Image: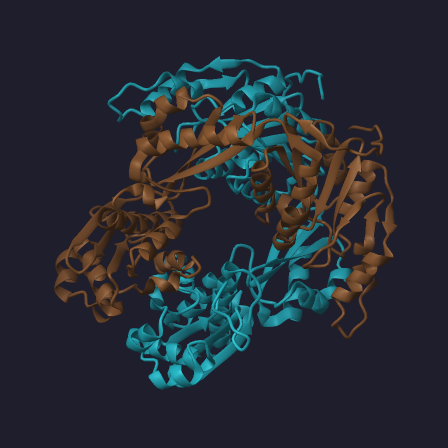
Chain colours: A brown, B cyan
Amino acid sequence: LLTEKINSTEVTSQEVNIMQYHIITVGSELTLGLAINTNAPFIAKRLGQEGYSCTCQISVPDNIPLISKAIRDSLSVSDGVIITGGLGPTADDVTREGICEASGRKLVYQPWLAEIIKERYGQRSTPLPDITFRQAYLPEGAKAIIPTIGSAPGTILESDGKFIISLPGVPREMTEMIEKEVVPWLKSKYRMSEAFKVRVLRTTARTEASLQEQIDDIMKSLDNVSVGILAYPGEIQLQLLAKGPSEEIALEIIKDAEKRFVERLGNIVFGFDDQTLEEVVGMLLRKNNLSIAVAESCTGGLTAKKITDIPGSSDYFLGGIVTYSDDAKRALLNVSRQTLQRHGAVSAATALAMAYGVREKFGSEIGLGITGIAGPTGGSPEKPVGLVYIGLSDGTTSYTNRYVFFGSREIIRLKSSSAALDMARYFILENFEQDRGDAS
Amino acid sequence: LLTEKINSTEVTSQEVNIMQYHIITVGSELTLGLAINTNAPFIAKRLGQEGYSCTCQISVPDNIPLISKAIRDSLSVSDGVIITGGLGPTADDVTREGICEASGRKLVYQPWLAEIIKERYGQRSTPLPDITFRQAYLPEGAKAIIPTIGSAPGTILESDGKFIISLPGVPREMTEMIEKEVVPWLKSKYRMSEAFKVRVLRTTARTEASLQEQIDDIMKSLDNVSVGILAYPGEIQLQLLAKGPSEEIALEIIKDAEKRFVERLGNIVFGFDDQTLEEVVGMLLRKNNLSIAVAESCTGGLTAKKITDIPGSSDYFLGGIVTYSDDAKRALLNVSRQTLQRHGAVSAATALAMAYGVREKFGSEIGLGITGIAGPTGGSPEKPVGLVYIGLSDGTTSYTNRYVFFGSREIIRLKSSSAALDMARYFILENFEQDRGDAS
């Protein structure tokens, strides 16, 4: 245990090669495994764009000594910590106390903060419980970040040349404070002499190994760019991290690496950074004035859900039909009794008939049909769990693909809907786009 | 920095009050914020069921000194660490080296492991790249956990009375090793003299505050049970953690607390632990021999997707129709032109007409209709973003509810689909179930 007291001195603006910090997420729901931590990745990614390097993420329970120890340990090997969570009004919100214990400071009541809290809860008729005003206490010497939503103020504390930044755990409140207060404050304190750029290339390669094989020589020839390959259901990502003496040079380095990878990989690169497959498909549909409708069996609405995740998708998405029985496929999608009897519900013919039917029903340019066996039951030796057929119809031409996906029900469904979206993407690229550069 | 060398001595089976461990997740994709950590919550939750207490979760990049430091720091304040990730064959997989640096051991080549790796890749025609055999090295003295899927062995190492357990980062491989090897090994080493039980009560309460108000007196009166209240989109959870001198007594304590909360809260408690709302609705439909179909506008397939997340849902889910335009609502759901003109697409009348229409189309007992404005655009002063109507029809009786949800497009859609499922749940509870105890 570190025991030296951390003294308060001002950090002044400095040019640095590297700024390394830790993220501490506070909450027993995290250490009990009852919640997924999305705050740490958001902060790491956002500050990574500024060149700040997160070297450790720590989750601790709502416990003053454990919070305090995490802060002190982190400060002993980094330039500062960003803490989220534990700033609410209830008794188990003890991040304030943890910061004070770690920095040897006292909590000080701030009457002006109490006024803000009263105002924020102003519309209530009942008097505020005393406990609410725990949020009006700040560690001595801390700068408050006034919340525009919620009632928990964030704080920025400078202590012995290090920073301790504390933010609410509610994602909306946290992200707003990061953007409006934390990033500007850090930029005023740490001017980076070395710049970092992150770029994610998103592909529909089948496996990590097949992707690596295609680009191994490029990966080995790159200076100042580290490359990670990561697999997600229906997607393989190439994550590039470039380093340079300035923003411009780092950007040039990463752009050059990106160009080489994209030239090599061609159309399997569907997008960059936060772009999802459904966003790219939506963009291509919009650009080419096309509309789409989807008929789903095993994916049960997931494909329609993904397409409509995108704001404004009503401009090109006309609708979807989920049919879970042969009767429904016949009645709602006009799949013929003959097709179902001769080929079965899980077949190329049925997938195509579904695509054709849903296109007719909604009057869209493109119809997609997805049928398969998501499992865990329902498979047979001839038609195993994971067998999926996808059909696409534009009224004149028909396309079908057969897949055998491996994994849980959830993963088979995710892969199936990605494969359907990717089929629509290739259809548009090949029939409506002159060069794929337009898709990026 | 801890510098004392950790010596190798055997841990023998012992009765303990508490076993505290840390989870270390290794991967630069985590510290760069490019991936969400689902391994740590899985492990914490699973081992929590055995009474083992995760007091810290740490994520570090693929970096030997940082991995080693995290291990040594963790061992200095805990009984052991469980590490995931960084066991693959590529050069950036350095968890093996990190463990050796932390424990002062060497990596030793295991010919029998090399054989297993060769066998696993046996079907390939090309010879295996040398790099694959990095996975055949183990820290000196470590017990190997042979993978049944994948090629990365896990390891259990005992060092100076502490454990260092290392598992692959691929969730399927990791979860299998936890279940088959890690839990049995830990149970043979640590017999708990105090038992812990976790129970999650899942509710459709509107806000954390409204829930807390209803149960505040019970919360304050409980001994040996700590209670956390956590909000998710469309759901508020009550997380109970009980402590007792034995499994039986801890179970009794938590059952008693659960009973008091359930009696007080009634039907807003929809399920327990991992039970989802769609699972409970599915169970109620199945039990009462009912079928359902859903018509969706703003949720765009999300509700059908949730219902079909559940294996076997084809027994009660007949299908869904997603209509994103007035034309489609008329053509596919028989919503009348008059209804759309007089009340608008976002109205109680349209929601009900959709429910009625989809029920007719699929021939289901229950029809659900969801229409609203998910945003971010499309709102007006009379019909703001977040306004959602849900209709339910059973052919004879009609129900509608109006909601104004707050949040992002994603959150409004999640809340809308949860509200629709909850409406179905209440409908079945009130019309087909004698006492709600059956629903749990």
Relative to A188, does residue B111 appear above or below in the rendering? above
Q: Position of residue A409 (x, y in %)?
A: 37, 50
Q: Position of residue B168 (x, y in %)?
A: 48, 31
Q: Position of residue B17 (x, y in %)?
A: 72, 38
- Write down the quadrant of residue A196 in the picture: top right
Q: Quadrant of the N terminus of chain A?
A: top right
B416 or B39, which lies in front? Answer: B416
Q: Is any part of residue B145 visible from this angle? A: no
**Which residue in the rendered view is the most extreme toward the front?**
A248
Does residue B120 appear to the left or right of B75 in the view shown? left
Q: Is any part of residue B290 visible from this angle? A: yes
Does residue A421 appear to the left or right of A71 in the view shown? left
Relative to B132, does residue A125 appear above or below in the rendering? below
Does residue A379 appear to the left or right of A171 in the view shown? left
Relative to A111, does residue B180 appear above or below in the rendering? above
Identify the residue at image location x=67%, y=21%: B160
Q: Quadrant of the C terminus of chain A?
A: top left
B293 or B136, which lies in front? Answer: B293
- Write down the quadrant of residue B222 in the picture: bottom right
Q: Position of residue A358 (x, y in %)?
A: 25, 64
Does residue A150 appear to the left or right of B129 in the view shown? right
Identify the residue at image location x=45%, y=34%: A239
Instruction: Report the label total.
Output: 0
B192 or B269, which lies in front? Answer: B269
